[in-house]
Amino acid sequence: MSGSRKFTNDYSELCHPDVLAALSRAAEAGEQNTAYGLDKHSAAAADAIRRVFGLPDGEVFLLTGGTQTNMTVISYLLRPYEAALACGTGHINVHETGAVEGSGHKVITCPGRDGKILPEEAERLILLHADEHMVKPGLIYISDATETGSVYTASELLALRDVCDRHGLYLFIDGARLASALTAPGGDVTPELIGQVADVFYIGGTKNGLLSGEAVVFRDGSLCGGFRRHIKNRGAMLAKGFVLGIQFEALFSDGLFFRMAEHANGLAEGLRKSLRKAGADVTGSSPTNQIFVRLAADAAETLITEFGLERWEVHGDGRETVRIVTSFASDEESCRVLGERVAGLLRKK
């Protein structure tokens, strides 16, 4: 498939061969495992996650997908009269078909900057919703990496943690692309810092080489006494939870979690440089595996057709922004072909 891969997203491939091999070994051995995530593989995966994120008292729960995870966690943490505060571009506000609102909780949005919530914006909205006739912000929701591919700095995360502490809110990190954020060039956020600042976060597997799966991590057990019941109540408890356990056990073996993200980020950075060299209008400040390019509408349509790119935004000046996403399975030859195609379209304009 070299030279012909699509760049639609980072979850179009089945899974990394090491993950498939782990599942195959369990099948070939004729394993029988305890159901509902109470198996040895899920326990081993949880132990590995606790070690990597520096959370000896952390509690880990394995769910299947990001929207399901966001809705389940947020509806568990919030009281009926409380709301989630998110950036306007946040996944729970734009790309989850009202799942959080469907659970009975309003999403309060702020403009943010490059996909990131600013602490002063969060504080202003918290103070604005002080009246008892208004919903009360109960948590701050952020994504890292964000929907625009940007990443939070350590100081930004600590500032948001401070806002939450002063106003009694939870900080919840959507980590669908957490591996990409943690391996982004120039980043200063460590796994241990994520464990320190977030009350709850999740580690995305779907967008980093697994068949499916997200690992929800509570900093300690004080918040999650009824979480398993809530998972069941929301229809999110997988009977064959060991399928997720086997995958996450493989993901945190031999550095695979980080290696796959480093590969995707590295290819994206090389492609980003070649696009800029060709004169492409690469927008935003993403250092991760998402690239956003503004092009004439006809050029954008050609790339959408040929490379499966997502139409991200339609502008009023006859141009469109498309999104390019690399993954663990992307290769240098495919990136070269895409870069040359973009350069060719730019020369024709």
Image (cartoon, rainbow, N blue to C red):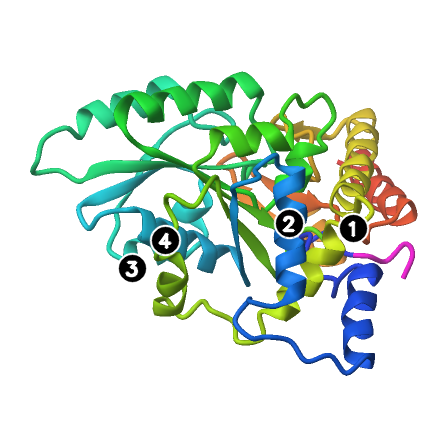
Q: Amino acid at mark 3?
A: Gly
Q: Which residue is mark 4?
A: 225
Q: Is 50 left, or right, of 279 in this rendering?
A: left
- Looking at the image, which residue is at 13% across and 38% down? 134
Which label belongs to residue 253?
A: 1
**What range is drawn magenta here?**
1-5
Q: Amino acid at mark 4?
A: Gly
Q: Is residue 62 above or below residue 179?
A: below
Q: Is 282 left, or right, of 314 in this rendering?
A: right
Nearer to us in this view, 12 or 322: 12
* Mark sitting earlier along the chain (1/3): 3
Q: Is residue 150 above or below residue 94?
A: above
Mark 2 crowd level (few <14, some 14–19, many ≥20, 10 Å Cα): some
Q: Check contact, mark 2 vs mark 1: CB within 8 A.
A: no
Q: Which residue is mark 3?
A: 102
In space, the residues marked 4 and 3 are separated at their CA atoms by: 24 Å
Q: Is 246 left, or right, of 128 in this rendering?
A: right
Q: Residue 104: within the magenta?
A: no
In space, the residues marked 1 and 3 are separated at their CA atoms by: 37 Å
Q: Amino acid at mark 2?
A: Asp
- Looking at the image, which residue is at 34% across and 57% down? 226
